[in-house]
């Protein structure tokens, strides 16, 4: 890949924030700016989570291994927008009243599940470096980072439980997410099947040689 | 992050219509109205009266002040006309303003029937002329947790009910919104059950605060705000204030209401503003007044304590 491509993607990922900042500055966020900021950052978390989760399937299906080099960046941007989303909530909605916030987290299931999704992203962001992969070892690191599945599901449920009646938007995210997770289930089944076959082949060959 | 707020300007300076008129449309509209007036040989004054030209930006004459008005800062016109929960057009609050642009509010009739001596079908302009229009500056609290202050124009619903003369059996009033899939694209989706219906107990409906509304900011009601005729019940959550009314039905049993049908555990028949009864999914203790940065505490009955006697002896946690 061309050398300038990654910085370009990086800047593009900041686009949603820049657009929001510009609109806020120009007073173009409409009647309820805080609601717009909350919803917009929330949307971008889900989009980045889905993009991150689509890297592996797309890479395998299209045979483009270089895509893997973008996965961490997309995942970290999901976390970045999650931090902004959380800050909007705790600052502009709760005004740093931790007592209020805790009441919300424990009482309102859509907040509970959204907060859980956010908290689960923290260890993933912290261990996203090459050093941490080495320290944990590939297998353990990978197991830990499967938490993103839980986080993404939590995010979609959070959105689903929050809307009043029109579930069409969270349903769209849910649909894409189920495709991406479904792909993994299928890939895992195919893989297991292959291993079984290979194992039985080995066993049969052993029988043949013994017999 | 900088969030512009517009609330520091006195309401008198925020609200004048000239400031928020779509000027191009206004100019075109004026030219068209003049041409039509000349062609038809009628005076401009008649053209401008709300009963003959019923479109937003048309001034309503002879509006009386009301002692029910609050002196709180009025929410800017552009916010009240661009941020609308009007699912008949869209579930996105920013869309009804555009989607309702060509909504036809004339001719328009309202059927008054049910427990009543004689069923009537009234032209909306006949209804509007029943009583003197009043300006009522009311707080308006949405169940979602935001609020606005709006100078509505209308008169007490009781004026209509008195004239309709319901039978003693009539214990409730049920309202219906227009059903028109061609004009109201939101009705094509099954997000809610259509047509939208709402109801009030008769004593609530007769309370002078319950406003039958056909204008705001001194002008004819814009389409996205419920033209040509809507209810405004300031002590209840906004969804009780039904828009684009085509039917007023008197009944002896409690009518169902659309949001209650959609989610009975979340939206009750009464739906009085009540900071002590949370929505199952969020708190109702505070609200964000549009244009304000900090949230403010929500008041019991949205601050309209004079309605408390309607509910004396009732468990408002149960009858939410």
Image (cartoon, grey):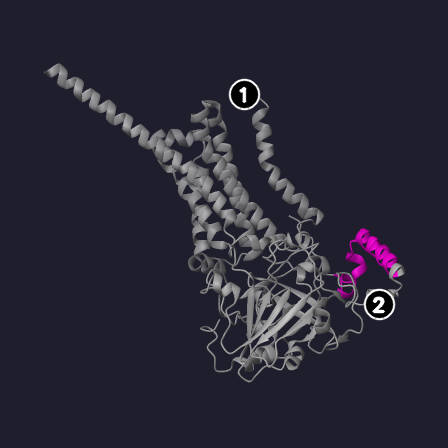
Front disc: 2 or 1: 2
Label 1 resides on the chain identified as A
Most foreground residue, A122 or B313? B313
In three-dimensional space, the C-alpha distance between marks 2 and 1, rounded to whole angstroms, equals 72 Å
Residue drawn at (61%, 69%), measured in percent from left and top?
B247
Most foreground residue, B189 or A190? B189
Residue drawn at (49%, 54%), measured in percent from left and top?
A162
Residue A119 position, x and y percent, is 44, 46
Q: Which residues are magenta?
A: B9-37
Most foreground residue, B263 or A177? B263
Most foreground residue, B207 or B69? B207
Res A184 quadrant in image: top left
Residue A22 position, x and y percent, is 68, 43
Label 2 resides on the chain identified as B
From the image, tell me which residue sits under label 1.
Answer: A1
Residue drawn at (48%, 26%), measured in percent from left and top?
A67
A20, above or below B301, in the image:
above
**Residue B279 showing in the rendered view:** no
Label 2, secondary structure: give it.
Answer: helix
Categorize mark 2 by other alpha carbons within 10 Å: few (<14), some (14-19), many (20+).
few
Q: Residue furthest top?
A: A209
Q: Is residue B129 magenta?
A: no
Label 1, secondary structure: give it.
Answer: loop
Q: Residue furthest left?
A: A211
CB-based contact (under 8 Å), mark 2 and mark 1? no
Categorize mark 1 by other alpha carbons within 10 Å: few (<14), some (14-19), many (20+).
few
**Residue B126 showing in the rendered view:** yes
From the image, tell me which residue sits under label 2.
Answer: B46
């Amino acid at each position: 890949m061309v050398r300038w491509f990654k910085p370009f993607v990086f800047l593009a990922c900041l686009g949603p924030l820049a657009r929001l900042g510009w609109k806020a500055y120009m007073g173009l966020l409409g009647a309820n700016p805080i609601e717009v900021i909350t919803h917009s950052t929330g949307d971008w978390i889900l989009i980045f989570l889905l993009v991150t989760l689509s890297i592996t399937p797309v890479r395998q299906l299209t045979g483009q291994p270089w895509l893997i080099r973008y996965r961490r960046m997309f995942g970290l941007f999901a976390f970045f927008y999650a931090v902004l989303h959380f800050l909007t909530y705790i600052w502009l909605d709760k005004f740093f009243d931790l007592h209020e916030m805790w009441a919300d987290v424990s009482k309102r299931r859509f907040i509970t599940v959204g907060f859980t999704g956010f908290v689960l992203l923290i260890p993933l962001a912290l261990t996203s470096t090459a050093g941490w992969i080495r320290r944990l070892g590939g297998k353990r690191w990978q197991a830990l980072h499967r938490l993103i599945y839980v986080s993404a599901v939590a995010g979609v449920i959070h959105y689903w439980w929050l809307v009043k009646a029109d579930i069409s938007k969270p349903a769209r995210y849910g649909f894409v997410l189920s495709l991406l997770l479904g792909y993994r289930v299928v890939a895992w089944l195919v893989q297991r099947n292959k291993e079984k076959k290979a194992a039985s082949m080995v066993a049969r060959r052993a029988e043949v040689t013994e017999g | 992050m900088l969030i512009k707020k517009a609330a520091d300007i006195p309401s008198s300076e925020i609200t004048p219509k000239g400031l928020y008129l779509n000027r191009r449309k206004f100019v075109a509209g004026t030219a068209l109205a003049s041409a039509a007036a000349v062609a038809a040989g009628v005076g401009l004054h008649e053209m401008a009266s709300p009963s003959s030209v019923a479109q937003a930006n048309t001034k309503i004459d002879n509006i009386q002040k009301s002692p029910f008005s609050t002196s709180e800062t009025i929410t800017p016109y552009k916010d009240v006309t661009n941020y609308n929960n009007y699912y008949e057009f869209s579930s996105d609050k920013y869309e009804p303003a555009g989607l309702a642009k060509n909504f036809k509010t004339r001719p328009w009739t309202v059927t008054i029937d049910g427990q009543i001596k004689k069923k009537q079908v009234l032209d909306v302009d006949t209804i509007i002329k029943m009583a003197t229009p009043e300006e009522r500056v009311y707080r308006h609290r949405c169940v979602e947790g935001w609020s606005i202050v709006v100078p509505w124009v209308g008169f007490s619903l009781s004026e209509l009910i008195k004239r309709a003369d319901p039978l003693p059996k009539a214990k409730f009033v049920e309202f219906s919104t227009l059903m028109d899939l061609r004009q109201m694209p939101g009705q094509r989706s099954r997000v809610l059950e259509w047509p939208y219906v709402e109801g009030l107990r008769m004593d609530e409906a007769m309370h002078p605060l319950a406003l039958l509304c056909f204008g705001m900011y001194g002008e004819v009601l814009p389409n996205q705000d419920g033209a040509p005729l809507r209810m405004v019940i300031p002590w209840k959550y906004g969804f009780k204030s039904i828009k684009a009314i085509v039917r007023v039905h008197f009944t002896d049993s409690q009518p169902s209401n659309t949001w209650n049908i959609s989610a009975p555990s979340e939206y009750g028949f009464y739906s009085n503003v009540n900071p002590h009864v949370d929505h199952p999914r969020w708190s109702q203790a505070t609200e964000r007044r549009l244009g304000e940065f900090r949230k403010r505490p929500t008041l019991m009955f949205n601050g309209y304590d004079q309605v408390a006697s309607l509910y004396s002896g009732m468990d408002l946690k149960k009858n939410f």
